[in-house]
Amino acid sequence: MRLAIDAMGGDHAPKEIVLGAMKAVQEYKDIEVTLVGNERQIKEYLTNQERIQILHTEEVILGTDEPVRAVRRKKNSSMVLAAKLVADGEADGCISAGNTGALMAAGLFVVGRIEGIDRPALSPTLPTINGDGFTLLDVGANVDAKPENLLQYAIMGSIYSEKVRSISKPRVGLLNIGTEEKKGTELTKNTFHLLENAALNFVGNVEARDLLDGVADVVITDGFTGNMVLKTIEGTAMSVFQMLKTALSSSVKSKLAAAVLMPDLKKLKSKMDYSEYGGAGLFGLKAPVIKAHGSSDANSIYNAVRQTREMVDKKVVETIKQTIEREIVK
């Protein structure tokens, strides 16, 4: 199995990208990795090249670049070249922690969409209290969506959850302002009826307040709403831990208590870190494309590699293609 990684994308590139790739190769003996980026900078941190190759380029897509224009003009950038390796059949999947919009554009223009998928969805797996997590589609690939798009998201999310997360008959929920069938906008009302009649384990409407309680394994919404939910969960977790840190350092007594609680607090923080589940999959493309968090460390990159490997090994894309052909394409 061959995976391409954009070594220059993200806040801590290339160091954390390289360290994460080496950890993954050491753990998984069946993968080969191509690091795409500046060879000199990569080699500063690459202490073991076993099953790791470097594709040199000095061009990089920056976080401030306009996504579509950058992909079209910077054809030799590390991100575009990683996607091209997939398109050319030289890699089975690719990973980047770089510009999200640019990666989505590279996925669409270079890797290509599955026939029958109108709009790919950006889909992270987020934490729940019981540790199982839930997959949220879409979190920003498409601000506007039609009911047919949300049905496709539900099919893809269900297949991913079954194949990669090993959930039998994943529960699919539609994010709404209430659980009643007639609640919500025209989009959610029309989507409800499509999901109700689809070959899915649809559990109905779910509310945002219940997401972390594990009310569903797959939660469907439009990209505008999904992005706000994602940022709210991420921001709330960061704020809570910051408040805890402030409270536990306010006095000598608090600091003593913090020393005792620290191991448990670290476990809790790890449990609420959605990068532990991997990156956000760009579902609906002809091959796995994973968007790692922009601030990814080595462990986050390792988890993104693990996730991509699972998607390739469990033939997630092939299953999506077959299901869409059977259920959607006429």
Image: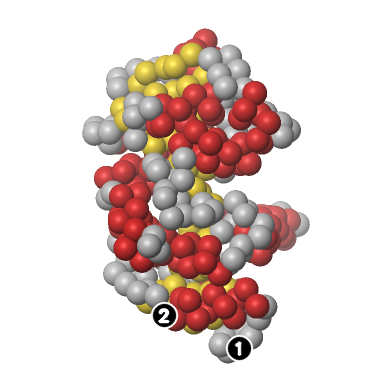
**Residue 252, located in which quarter of the rendered image?**
bottom right
- Where does residue 278 sit, x and y in percent of width and height? 45, 48
Q: Could you tell whether 283 is left or right of 258 in the image?
A: left
Question: Quarter holding the N terminus?
Answer: top left
Along the line of sight, the residue nearer the viewer: 211 or 175? 175
Numbered badge on residue 182? 1
Residue at 40% x, 32% y is: 86
Residue at 68% x, 31% y is: 69
Along the line of sight, the residue nearer the viewer: 243 or 56? 56
SS class of the residue under badge 1?
loop
Numbered badge on residue 197? 2
Q: Pointers 2 and 1 in contact (CB under 8 A)? A: no
SS class of the residue under badge 2?
loop
Residue at 50% x, 81% y is: 193
- Where does residue 102 sit, x and y in percent of width and height? 61, 36
Along the line of sight, the residue nearer the viewer: 107 or 326? 326
Which residue is outermost to the top? 40
Q: Nearer the viewer, mark 2 or mark 1?
A: 2
